[in-house]
Image (cartoon, rainbow, N blue to C red):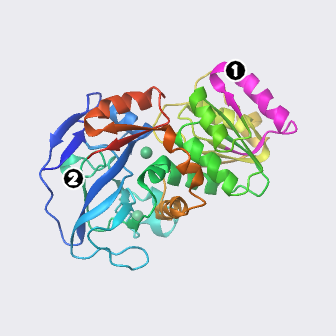
Amino acid sequence: MPRAAVIPKPNSAVEIRQVPEPQLEPDSALFEVELSEVCGTDVYLQQGRLQGVPYPLVPGHVSIGHLSKIRGSIRDVDGRELREGDRVTFLDVHRTCNACWYCLVAKATTRCPHRKVYGITYGLDDGLCGGWAEQIYLKPGTRCILCVSDAETFMAGGCALPTALHAVERGGISIADTVLVLGSGPVGISSIILALMRGALRVFCIGAPDLRLDVASEVGAAGVLNFEKHDERGRLEWLLERTGGRGADVTIEATGAPDAVVQAMRFTRDAGRVVVVGQYTDHGPVSSRAAFNPHLDLNKKQLDVRGCWGSDFSHFYRAVQIVSDPNRSKPWAALQSKLSHYKLAQANEALADVAAGRVLKALIHPR
Ligand SMILES: [Zn+2]
Ligand SMILES: [Zn+2]
């Protein structure tokens, strides 16, 4: 029986359980997990801060491994039939219906009400649906992609890479733009790399702690600032000095702090663009200290503010292509030495280290 790390209920420690090997429905598969990860969302899952989550739950939404058993037939987006033994990853979002109003009229599949996410909105009752396990049950209709990237380079991007790719796309960055990234976690770091890839002249990053800001510099940030050492006014002055007194052309908020959304607007030049991607968990309203002023912070600035929810197949597919390319994958390959490794039985430790920001990225090795 495969072993899985399970969050039994909100605010309780992860337990290792033996789970019966799933019975395969037609056109489903068993996936042997090589590597999975711990991201900020997993910390919030453990704290019970996401809505619509069924516990008990096996976390781990993005993983890499291989198909060990296939029943029926599974094809990739190129129409290729996948075989047992193929090295793959799969889109964590499942059951996007392509039949509802959001899918067909708004063309915003990330808002499809039928979508389910492995490791987040699929619980243990739905089967082995998370990457903190030796095996994952891939239900019919799961979107698999062949992946030749080495596992650690792939996971250095992990779930943050498609999310950041979506954010950078929503940012509509033009060649030679100055971009500001708020937040230096995995989404922030991948956003810096992708903004440069998209043609930004310079990317600045305001985040913390210094350990993560060093990584931001290594991947190409032109300047970094630790927000813990500077108040909002100090941060704004620092940025204005570097942007001709105007602010960033495009700001990507990837912090998880509601007040940072208002700051993102203030740090952006008039008629610029702000992408909010760091509020995947409901952290509540902005504080009274942030004192959002619609006239000064939004209307008069003629800002374009865009939300960015999760990612869809196109973002995940492009992310896999990038980390599979010998040249384009280099920034993530260079992060390998910054990754921290945990066995399944160390999942609680991994969660605590991610929650405290002690590590850039925690990987789970189920085997
Ligand atoms: Zn739909
Ligand atoms: Zn994640």
In-front residue for pair 340/249: 340
Note whether residue 52 is visible.
no
In-front residue for pair 275/32: 32
Q: Residue 179 in the image: state x and y as whole percent.
A: 72, 45
The disc at residue 231 is: 1
Which residue shows up at 18% across the image and 45% down it?
A: 3
Q: Is residue 364 magenta?
A: no
* Residue type, numbered disc 1: Asp
Q: Residue 9 in the image: state x and y as whole percent.
A: 24, 33
Q: Which residues are magenta?
A: 224-251
Give the vertical position of 326 relative to 353 (above or below): below
Q: Residue 128 in the image: state x and y as whole percent.
A: 22, 52
* N-term mark: 1 or 2: 2
Please tell me how crowded label 1 is: few (under 14), some (14-19), or many (20+) other residues with Cα within 10 Å: few
The disc at residue 126 is: 2
Give the vertical position of 185 relative to 60 (above or below): above
- Judge: label 2 CB < 8 Å from ligand 2: no
